Amino acid sequence: MQSCDILIQARWCIPVEPDNCVLDNHGIAISDGRIVAVLPADDARAQFSPGVLVDRPDHVLIPGLINAHTHAAMTLFRGLAEGLPLERWLREGIWPHEQRWVSAEMVRDGTKHAIVEMLRGGVTCFSDQYFFPEVVASAAVDLHMRAMIGTPVMDFPTPWAQNADEYLAKATDLVHDPYADHSLISSCFAPHATDALSEESGQKLRVLADQLDRRVQIHLHETATEIATTVQDHGQRPFERLSELGLVNASLMAVHAVHMTEEELQQFSVTGVSVAHCPRSNLKLASGIAPVQAMLDAGINVALGTDGAASNNVLDMLGEMRTAALLGKVKADDAAAVPASTALRMATLNGAIALGLDDEVGSIEVGKSADLTCVDLNHINSQPVYDPIAQLVYACNREQVSDVWVAGRHQVENGDLTQVDEEEILQRSREWQQRIAAV
């Protein structure tokens, strides 16, 4: 009999690859943080002698959810600047608070709060875009969370850097040290938007991204106002500016991409650009509804993100899947659009592809990291079960997440955090609320 560290038995296993596949009563064997076998439960028990046996008879096991776009530290701004459109929300509500409060301490505490919230909701990997990215990386390592760390790039000063050259220099430092070879941490460049970059800064970014072989993620065509302003100031749509800079390629993840022409979507498809769809943030800020089914039909890889907690207001990927599926149907005027299996794929493997991590995570396959999430379907709102994938997407909520593993470490067990003092993190957040509210 072969030994393994962990053997998980679940009533249903949805590997995501191949698509729309459901495995009944299967076992997943894990050793050294990696999946070593996926096989029927009876065969798994006969073949493996596990150090730990986890039996989940009413549960569905899926790849860990991947939040392809967020601003983790903004959990500390949750509930500020409500009821404003994006441009006013930023200029009147968010940016003044960031100028006053953003610091390494604030980013550390807000990021840890976000990681705990995401773990409880079945997220095992997040792509972040915020200031003090080295602090975000440190917080992720401390809490054993997989993260893509986006380093901001812009022309105006912030609490982290004063100009584009300093942003790029600090980003380069993060690439080389201390996380260059860390198994949980990757990095990319994350300019805020095209209107935050001059032509010179954009060209420097492109050269450096090519030299360091790093991906780029950017807010793009989030609102009609963004496009109109860029046309007025530069005579081009943001996509055109980005294309002229040579940044429209397979290393680009366009965040939001709500207002796209057919020609622009075709260019996304031809060049291999991925999209990070953030449906609930787009709804809350009245930014519009992205044409997700049209993107999928064009062969574009569409991932799923929550955006930050200041514009969502929850980092809830199960809820994001449901919203994406429902909105996709309305936008396409087709009840068959964005089916449940596609929504799940957007929240897992498509996210991994967008972040360049699909060799490591995003599906339940032998050799991949054991980033896994288990959801209890034995709840009144998710019974009876005819189609586990549909039930997961349309009926479940994040409180049903029972177990989460990141690289084989059991981070959530039977609904309880195993490695984190949640009360300590909540206390720090309450202290921040008192400081921010007192001004």
Image: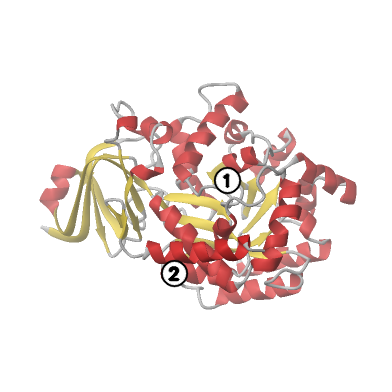
Q: What residue did someone put label 2 on?
A: 141
Query: Can I make out residue 359 in this image?
Result: no
Measured as percent of width and height from the top left, residue 314 is found at 51, 47
**Residue lying farthest to the front in this orientation:** 438
Give the residue type that dot 1 points to: Asn
Query: Can I make out residue 344 in this image?
Result: yes
| Mark positioned earlier in the residue sequence (1 or 2) | 2
* Snapshot quadrant of residue 266: top right
Measured as percent of width and height from the top left, residue 271 is found at 66, 47
**Residue found 69% across the figure and 39% down from its top:** 287
Q: Looking at the image, is 103 positioned above or below residue 290?
A: below
Measured as percent of width and height from the top left, residue 200 is found at 82, 65
Determine whether, in the image, residue 291 is placed left or right of residue 378. Answer: right
Measured as percent of width and height from the top left, residue 412 is found at 32, 56
**Residue lying farthest to the top in this orientation:** 334
Question: Dot 2: few (<14), some (14–19), or many (≥20) neighbours within 10 Å?
Answer: some
Q: Quadrant of the N terminus?
A: bottom left
Question: Dot 1: few (<14), some (14–19), or many (≥20) neighbours within 10 Å?
Answer: many
**Residue found 39% across the figure and 52% down from its top:** 120
Determine whether, in the image, residue 326 is placed left or right of residue 197. Answer: left
**The one of 203 and 391 positioned closer to us in this rendering:** 391
Disc number placed over residue 312 in the picture, else none: 1
Mark 1 touches mark 2? (CB < 8 Å): no
**The one of 265 and 82 positioned closer to us in this rendering:** 82
**SS type, badge 2:** helix
